[in-house]
Amino acid sequence: MNQQLLAFERQLQSSILVQIKEPFIQEQGIELWLKRDDLLHPIMSGNKWRKLKYILEHALSLKAQTIVSMGGAYSNHLHALAYVGKALQIATKAKIRGEQPALLNPSLQDMSDWGMQLEFVARTDYRELRNYQRYDALPELQVGEYWLPEGGALPLALRGVAELVGELDVDYDMICVPCGTATTLAGIISALPENKQALGFAALKGAGFLYDDVRQMLKNTLHHNKDWSIQLDYHFGGFAKIKPDLCAFIQQFSKTQGIALEPVYTGKMLYGLYDLIRQGYFTAGQRIIAVHTGGLQGNRGFA
Ligand SMILES: Cc1ncc(COP(=O)(O)O)c(C=O)c1O
């Protein structure tokens, strides 16, 4: 890999596995472990470096000078991209969903401080941008610009995420991960050993389409018959929607486990996992590994 990228990667901390101990989990004979990708880096935390590293390598190999991407006003993806762009001296531009606010929120302010050029895009135009799924697909792209779809969902993202599976040095039955675009889930499936399962938890409502998206991401690979599924019922009303139950769970979890969560992705997944364990969804003796995908900067949107 490119020297600049290797130097950045060397700054990362390790993503340890910690066991989540709760009497009701033990009573079911289940083991729940959390893979602490949130510890990888204070800003490039969770799935962000994993998804971006081979994309950045590709962009640099094409001598791209600017990466153009899209996201919401609290996007973890854009926040991480702006940061890594500054660190690697690659210019970044973002198309932000919705009207320009009178005052930038703290996430947008960080992006702007790190040199990302922000453009605010009407919601209908924003939806259109989702049609451009290749790095060179955005019609307005200028020479030297590289297009990165929403959430960093390019096929090369899977390769970095697959490395997470290779890091697991304990035996396990299932890997659980929150899903936005489900690129992270697809990356995990792509590296999943036989007789293991992957379970995604959709962060958005009505996310049944993610099944087709994952199949599409895995097409042309040998991984289409892996054992995976997605829980669609733990969205709490929609993307970034919260309810008192979820907030109480996150507070209680951070008190008992000493681990901070955010309510958009990992909070919803762990709430769902606790619920499924209580319902007897898993078999006694199973060891489940859930991935903490970071994104704690987004908590500033809920303050
Ligand atoms: C913190 C966090 N967790 C999980 C996800 C979901 O990742 P994916 O879009 O690959 O499903 C995202 C979105 O990129 C995220 O920011």
Image: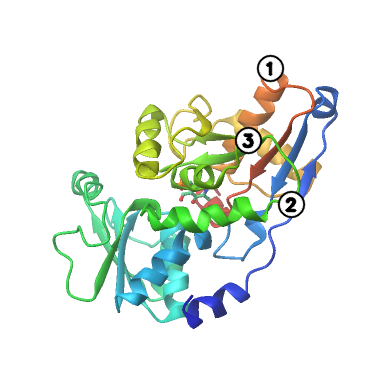
Q: Which residue shows up at 52% across the image and 59% down it? A: 50
Q: Which residue shows up at 36% across the image and 71% down it? A: 116
Q: Is 29 placed left or right of 70 in the picture?
A: right
Pointer 3 residue: 196
Amino acid carrying label 1: it is Gln
Q: Looking at the rendering, which quadrant does residue 121 occupy?
A: bottom left
Q: Position of residue 16 (x, y in %)?
A: 73, 56
Amino acid carrying label 2: it is Asp
Task: Establish if 252 lies above or below 149.
Answer: above
Task: Establish if 264 lies above or below 5.
Answer: above
Q: Looking at the rendering, which quadrant does residue 79 occupy?
A: bottom left
C-beta proximity under 8 Å, tags 3 and 1 = no
Of labels 3 and 1, earlier in sequence is: 3
Can residue 47 be seen?
no
Label 3, label 1: how many angstroms apart (C-alpha)?
Answer: 21 Å
Q: How is the image coloured?
A: rainbow
What numbered label is drawn on residue 279? 1
Q: Which residue shows up at 47% across the image and 62% down it? A: 106
Of labels 1 and 2, earlier in sequence is: 2
Q: Say which of marks 3 and 1 sits in front.
A: 3
User: Observer-nearest residue: 53 or 170?
Assistant: 170
Label 2, label 3: how many angstroms apart (C-alpha)?
Answer: 14 Å
